[in-house]
Image (cartoon, helix red, strand yellow):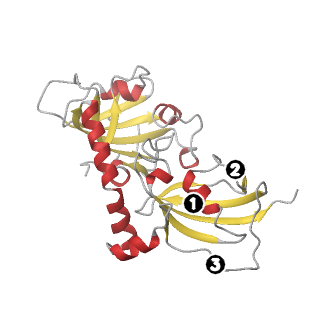
């Protein structure tokens, strides 16, 4: 856990690092050595809105691990600041909101939850420096633990329920489609409206569809693989709850915007709302 709360004024008692970042050191390392010859830094980290609402943290979203490549040739203000740290340093950053989402999450547009903010708050602690091979090993451990997360979070450790819920494709069905023979099933090539919401297993929102989100039924690459598979099982007005293991969701690399870490299973609620008339 972090040892200090945010200041209510984002420019009080902070030092300017560059045009994007103000920082405040919370705890210092016992060593004067800053940075490392090793290319990867592992952080304990929280990202917060200007009003102190956490929208991403390493504890809940990535097994308390957040890795940054310090030798990345496309250096951002964030990476440049991390290169100044020693193991054990704790600090809080106030990062220009537009630059933050561009630099850290690779987004050109500020998400709705921060659109009225001027900064993003970051609380972090430098845990260790690692070689790439060590990072790869940590990722493999996360992959091995994935089934265990699903078993414990969704099924309370009940192995029988865990096995019964999983179909041959690897989808875990928390609820099944209704056996309604009168409901219409979309045909290949139909334009259909769907709605879905995806959650981390702790219940935090991770992914959601736009209003009146439209896809062409039967075509791939419009949604993630697991959702595409499930949609083909549904009829109009069907709503189901499922869990997708990472290989059917965002896989070993996570989402492009980095909000969903690698090897992360997700729970989804999905509904087919209607077939659009041509």
Image position, residue 257 (x, y; %): 51, 40
Q: Which badge, 3 or 2, comes first in the chain's sequence?
A: 3
Circle 1 sits in a helix, a strand or a loop, which is it?
A: strand
Answer whether residue 65 is visible to the viewer in this image. no
Q: Which residue is mark 3?
A: 178
Image position, residue 6 (x, y; %): 35, 46
- The label number, if any, that marks residue 229 in the structure image: none
The span from disc 3 to disc 2 (Cα, nearest Å) is 24 Å
Q: Which badge, 2 or 1, comes first in the chain's sequence?
A: 1
Residue at the (42%, 49%) spot, across then down: 56
Q: Nearer the viewer, residue 56 or 217?
A: 217
- Which quarter shows the C terminus? bottom right
Q: Nearer the viewer, residue 35 or 25?
A: 35
Q: Which badge, 3 or 1, comes first in the chain's sequence?
A: 3
| Left or right placement of residue 85 versus residue 266 in this view | left
Residue at the (86%, 60%) spot, across then down: 277
Residue at the (61%, 64%) spot, across then down: 270
Name the front one of labels 2 and 1: 2
- The label number, if any, that marks residue 197 in the structure image: 1
Circle 2 sits in a helix, a strand or a loop, which is it?
A: loop
Given the current orientation, which residue lies at the most extreme front position? 168
Q: Which residue is mark 2?
A: 219
Circle 3 sits in a helix, a strand or a loop, which is it?
A: loop
Q: Nearer the viewer, residue 177 or 59?
A: 177
């Amino acid at each position: 856990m972090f040892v200090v709360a945010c200041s209510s004024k984002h420019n009080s008692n902070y030092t300017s690092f560059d045009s994007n970042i103000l920082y405040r050191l919370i705890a210092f390392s016992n060593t004067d050595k800053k940075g490392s010859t090793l290319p990867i830094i592992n952080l304990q980290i929280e990202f917060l809105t200007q009003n102190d609402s956490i929208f991403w943290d390493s504890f809940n979203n990535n097994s308390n691990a957040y890795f940054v490549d310090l030798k990345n040739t496309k250096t951002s203000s964030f990476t440049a600041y991390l290169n100044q740290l020693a193991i054990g340093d704790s600090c809080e950053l106030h990062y220009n909101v537009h630059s933050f989402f561009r630099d850290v999450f690779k987004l050109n547009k500020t998400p709705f939850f921060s659109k009225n903010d001027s900064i993003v708050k970051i609380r972090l602690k430098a845990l260790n420096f690692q070689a790439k091979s060590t990072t790869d090993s940590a990722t493999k451990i996360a992959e091995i633990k994935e089934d265990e997360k699903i078993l414990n979070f969704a099924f309370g450790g009940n192995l029988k329920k865990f096995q019964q819920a999983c179909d041959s494709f690897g989808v875990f069905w928390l609820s099944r489609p209704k056996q309604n023979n009168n409901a219409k099933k979309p045909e290949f090539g139909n334009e259909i409206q769907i709605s879905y919401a995806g959650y981390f297993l702790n219940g935090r929102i991770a992914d959601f569809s736009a209003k009146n989100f439209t896809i062409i039924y039967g075509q791939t690459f419009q949604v993630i693989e697991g959702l595409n598979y499930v949609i083909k099982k549904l009829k109009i007005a069907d709503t189901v709850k499922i869990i997708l293991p990472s290989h059917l969701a965002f896989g070993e690399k996570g989402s492009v915007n980095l909000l969903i870490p690698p090897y992360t299973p997700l729970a989804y609620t999905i509904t087919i709302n209607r077939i659009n008339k041509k």
